[in-house]
Amino acid sequence: MVEMVNRPYASAFEAYAVKHPDVLCLSADLTSSCEIDGFRDRHPGQFLSLGMAEQNMMSFAGGLGLAGYRPFLHSFGVFLYRRPYDQLMASVAYPRRKVRLMGFLPGITTPGGMTHQAIEDVAVMRSIPNMSILETGDATEVESICEAADSIDGPVYCRVLRGSVPRLFDSPIKVGEMRELSLGADVLVVTSGIATEEALRARDALSRAGVSIRHLHIHTIKPFNEQALLDHIGSVSKGVVVLENHVITGGVGSLVAEIMADNGVGKPLVRLGLNDTYAHGGSKPYLMKHYGLDAGALVRGIERIIGASTGIDEEALASARVDAVHSAVKAEAL
């Protein structure tokens, strides 16, 4: 039974920020939705509300960075790069300010539809010079994301999970590394964020079907340990499957493809994610199944790599975890 942790970010950020008075908490009118309302109430001297004005918040954060502070900006991911893109480039990325962008609702983790779903954020942030990218995949990584982000000398964008989050790992994020979850010899599976839990659902069934899986979980997308990935690719005989909560263009799948191409690696690669489409509103399990981001889609991708059917159906996979729809409880939280 997977342990579920309620609002791990709320307690982790407060514990970290109170020990570092030069860390400031910035909000753009989504304070409770980003789990920092308790921090606001208990530590008003370290909290700033910039209102629904993300462009101003980004420029303001750049100024705080220049003054020696380390601002943590809290909003939904889409509002930290789409709306204030010019300010992000000019005031934060170009001068390499120590601004920490805590982006909630990554990918299809919200029923809010395209206006709230950050489906191309990794692609955008990967293209920005000086920008680092971290992504959380479980409660332990959420609990360690603040310290990890704040260890980076320059701006960093984080894909943060909220609400009730499963605990899959027992060690914190180590920037620049990757988690080796299994070391099989047939197919390399690379996952990040919520896709890792889906891969874990499929692993026992794949093992019973005789497919040996080497599984990597990626929490540091930029900077990336290129040689470690190449070593893992060299250790499998069939090929690579990447599953991510993102469009397949520009994300982790593209990162893997680029490294393989740059180094002349000719093994097959299957990229699974949103395929040149926006996602509509719906529950996370529904959207993951509908758009091919779940355990079943991963099995089909592995079958493409090995050129054979595994015989694995939905009944053979571990049960999907069904979350309560957050907006049904709190309408403004989408």
Image (spheres, grey):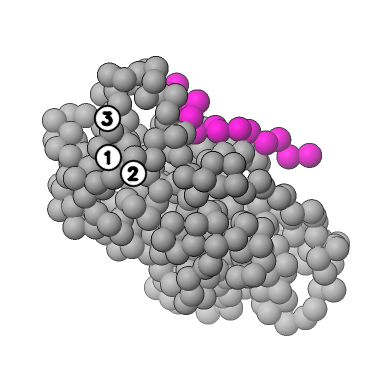
Residue placed at 77% from the left, 67% from the top? Answer: 211
Quarter assignment of residue 46 = top left
Residue that numbered label 2 is attached to: 101
Residue 321 drawn at (x, y percent)? 72, 50
Say if 43 sits above or below 175 in the image: above
Please state which of the two labelled residues, at mark 2 or mark 3, is closer to the viewer.
Answer: 3
Of the two numbered discs 1 and 2 in the rendering, the one whose residue sits closer to the viewer = 1
Q: Is residue 100 visible?
A: no
Q: Label 1: state its secondary structure.
A: loop
Question: What residue is pinned by disc 1?
Answer: 51
| Residue 28 visible in the displayed image | yes
- The mark that comes first in sequence, 2 or 3, is 3
Question: Under tag 2, what secondary structure?
Answer: strand
Circle 3: residue type:
Leu
- Quadrant of the rendered structure where residue 62 is? top left
For the residue marked with disc 2, what is the amino acid? Leu
Tag 3 secondary structure = strand
Left or right of 18 on screen, residue 99: left
- Residue 94 x %, y %: 16, 52
Tag 1 and tag 2, C-beta contact below 8 Å:
no
In the shown orientation, is residue 143 left or right of residue 84? right
Vertical position of residue 6 compared to residue 280: above or below = above
Observer-nearest of 50 and 252 = 50
From this view, report whether residue 40 is shown above or below residue 127: above
For mark 3, what is the residue?
48
**Residue 236 is covered by the magenta coloring:** no
Residue at mark 1 to residue at mark 2: CA–CA distance: 16 Å
Q: What numbered label is drawn on residue 138?
A: none
Tell which circle, 1 or 2, labels the residue nearer the N-terminal end.
Answer: 1
Instruction: Please provide the residue range marked out in magenta.
Output: 1-15
